Amino acid sequence: MQTVSNVLNLVKEAIKPALQKAQVVVDATAGNGHDTLFLAEHTAETAKIYAFDIQETALNNTRAITADYAGRINYVLASHDKIAELVSGPIDVAMFNLGYLPGEEHCVTTKKESTMTAVKQVLDKLSCNGVCVIVAYPGHEAGAQEASCLEAFFAVLPRKDYTVGCYRLLNHARTAPYAYVIEKVR
Ligand SMILES: C[S@@+](CC[C@H](N)C(=O)[O-])C[C@H]1O[C@@H](n2cnc3c(N)ncnc32)[C@H](O)[C@@H]1O
């Protein structure tokens, strides 16, 4: 099995240490629940997880595969641009796996406006050494727009407050998915 080319798996590995210490975790795009399940499996029993999605089907799928952890998951049928309103306290780890729900309507995809609002809200609420990971899919139109907005925003984020890394496959197509990892440094 290739690991280096699987951007999503690689960022999941990268956040495992932060997850072990996390008390508040956000899956900003719950989808079919695979990422929520991963977050639940790698956090302490005292950790609270918020799973956001705008599609009821997605949240139902997430509920089904995370049933063993339902006691500490808050399933939120709302856009992630409501994170500031709906998540109380600082966030230790947040994950955005952008794009559309595999197998469903591609028109229900994450969009640059709400994604940027949500990312800014998460960064404002990140605890010290808190981590936010974002997997971007520039291979479709809305995804390409999101990716370029994220790039422009992260490029000027003050270094004294956040460190931003980008993991990109340099010898794959330019449209291949890539990931940002942001850590709050103080
Ligand atoms: C690529 S899927 C996420 C995959 C998912 N994390 C998993 O493990 O299966 C992207 C999801 O983002 C959701 N989405 C789109 N816009 C959203 C928004 N504004 N707020 C929250 N979720 C949104 C879509 O409904 C879709 O389910």
Image (cartoon, rainbow, N blue to C red):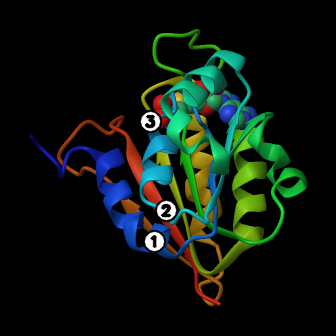
In this orientation, which residue lies closer to the viewer: 63 or 55? Answer: 63
Mark in the foreground, 3 or 2: 2
For the N terminus, which image quadrant? top left
Q: Position of residue 49 (x, y in %)?
A: 64, 53
Task: Please provide percent x and percent y for residue 150.
Answer: 60, 53
Q: What residue is pinned by disc 2?
A: 43
Q: On the picture, is 170 further left or further right than 59? A: left
Above or below residue 102? Residue 113 is below
Q: Secondary structure at mark 2?
A: loop
Where disc 1 sits, the SS reads: helix
Q: Nearer the viewer, residue 31 or 169?
A: 31
Question: What residue is rendered at 47% in x and 42% in y?
Answer: 37
Relative to residue 109, is residue 17 depicted above or below?
below
Amino acid type, mark 1: Gln
Q: Quadrant of the C terminus?
A: bottom right
Residue drawn at 81 percent across, 70 percent down: 89
Return the residue at label 1. 20
Give percent across and percent down for residue 147. Answer: 54, 44
Whether the residue under disc 1 has CB within 8 Å of ligand 1: no
Residue at 56 percent of width and 71 percent of height:
22
**Mark 2 or mark 1: which comes first in sequence?**
1
Q: Residues within 10 Å of mark 3 (few under 14, many from 20)?
A: some
